[in-house]
Image (cartoon, rainbow, N blue to C red):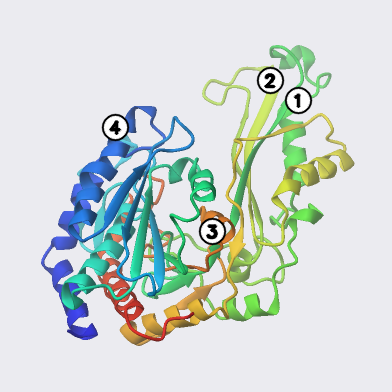
Amino acid sequence: MTREASLQDIERYFDGGGFVTDLARRVAIPTESQNPERGAALAAYLTDEMQPILERRGFRCTILPNPVAKYGPFLLAERIEDPALPTVLTYGHGDVIRGQDEQWRSGLSPWKVTREGDRLYGRGTADNKGQHTINLAAMQAVLERRGRLGFNLKVLIETGEEVGSPGLKDLCSTHKDLFAADVLIASDGPRLQPQRATMFLGSRGAYNFDLSLDLRKGGHHSGNWGGLLRNPGIVLAHAIASITDVNGAIRVPEWRPNSLTDSVKRAIDGLVVEGGDDGPQIDADWGEPGLTPAERVFGWCSFEVLAFVTGNPDKPVNAIPPRASAHCQLRYVVGVNPDDILPALRRHLDAHGFQMVTMTPSREGYFAATRLDPDHPWVRWTAASIERTTGTKPAILPNVGGSLPNDVFADVLGLPTVWIPHSYAACSQHAPNEHMLAPVARDALRIMTGVFWDLGETGTPQ
C-alpha cells in the first residue's frame, strides 16, 4: 500500500487502454449545451454515465435541478469518510460546444475517440470530459490501493459551462452547506507548455458585448449617395480603433489594471507561453508595451473584436449599408471593476465623438476575474505534491488567460482554488478536430494520483 504502487496502477490503466475506453464512452454522448435539442443527452451524461460509476465507488449522488429552468442539471457526489478529515471539492463539466460534425477532418468524428499518434481526437477530449475522466480515474486508483481516500471528496459536475454556467452561482449561493470544503482542486484549460505540469489559481474574467450603429432604413446606391451619407461600417471601425492603439494596447483607462503586483510578477517571471508544434507564433509587438508575453496574458487585459458585420459580406452590392455591428470581448484580470466595463467604454467613446454607437451586453452574466495569492499554503502544498511525482517544479500561474466560473468557488463559497490543467493551448478546443495529447494524459494521471494520495496523508494545510 504505497504511493509508488498507486502510480504504477494508474500507468497500467492508461497503457492497457482503460483511459481511452472510459473517455470514448463519454465522448460518444453528444452533450452539446449550445444545442437546445440535447437536453436528454445532458441529463443522461449525469444519470447514466457518471452517477453509477461514482456510486460504485462509495459516493452518495444527488441530481440537482438547475435554478434556471431551461438549462441542464448538476450532479453532486459526496464521499465523507470522516468529518474531521480535510474536505476537497472537485469540479468538471460534462457539456461540450457544438460538434461541428461536417467541419472535422476526413476520418474523424466529434462523437468518437480516434487515436492518431499522440493525439486523441473527439469533442470533449480536452474540454472537459478528458480532464475530469483523468481526475476520477486517479481518485479510483488511490481508493483501490489504499482502501480509502483518507480525506473527504465532493464532486460537482455541471452541464452548462459552455453557455456560461447558468444557475451555478445561484445553486452554490443557496446551498453553501452542500458544497462546503477546505479547498477546490479541479482541472480545466491548458498547460503553459505541453510537456510542463502547470497550476493556475484563478482566471481572467470575460465580458462580451455588442457595438452597433444603425443610421437609416435600407441601403442607398453608392454612386448616387457616396460622399453624402455617413457609412456606418467606417464610423464603427474608427470607434473600435479608438479603444486600442495600432498594436492592441488598451486606451480605456478603467480597463488598465493596477493589479500586476510584485508577487504576481514573481510568479510569472521566466514563464514561456507556448502552444506546441501547431500553436501560432506570438506577435512580440502586440499588446501592452513593456510587458512580457506571460505578463500580457496572465497579468493584463486584452480587448478582442470577435466578429464585425456591415452590408452583406456574402453578396456585396454597390450600396452604402444602413447598419454595422461588432461582437467584442474584454478579457480582464483582478483590478478591473466588471460593473464599470461598459460605462467606462461609454465615457471613452463619447469623449472621442462616437456618441451614436450603441453598446449592449451580449448576455446577462459574465465570468468574473479571480486570483489566489501564489504564496497561499494550498498552492505550496499542491506544487510540492506535483514535484514529488514529476521531479520538476510546476509552472504556477496567478490566473489562467481564459475564463472559468471560478468566482463561484472563490467568492461565493470562499474556497482557495487550485487548478491543474491537463490540456494544451493548441488542442483545437471549441473548434473542429479537438484533441488531447496522450503523453499529457498519462502524465496527468500520475500527477493527480499523487495529489489524491498525498491528500490522504498528514501535512495538508489547515
User: Which label sits on residue 40?
Assistant: 4
Residue where numbered disc 2 is placed? 321
Residue where numbered disc 1 is placed? 231
Residues under numbered marks 1 and 2 in contact, where contact means CB atoms less than 8 Å apart:
yes
Residue where numbered disc 3 is placed? 413
Q: CA distance from mark 4 to mark 2?
A: 43 Å
Q: CA distance from mark 4 to mark 3?
A: 29 Å
Residue 246 placed where, x, y %?
72, 53
**Image depth: mark 3 or mark 1 in front:** 3
**Image depth: mark 4 or mark 2 in front:** 4
Q: Mark 4 or mark 1, which is nearer the start of the sequence?
A: 4
Residue 179 placed where, x, y %?
45, 57
| Number of other residues with Cα within 10 Å of mark 2, as a class: few under 14, some 14 to 19, many 20 or more | many
Q: Is residue 276 above or below residue 358?
A: below
Q: Amino acid at mark 1?
A: Asn
Q: Quadrant of residue 277?
A: bottom left
- Residue for point 61% across, 57% down: 369
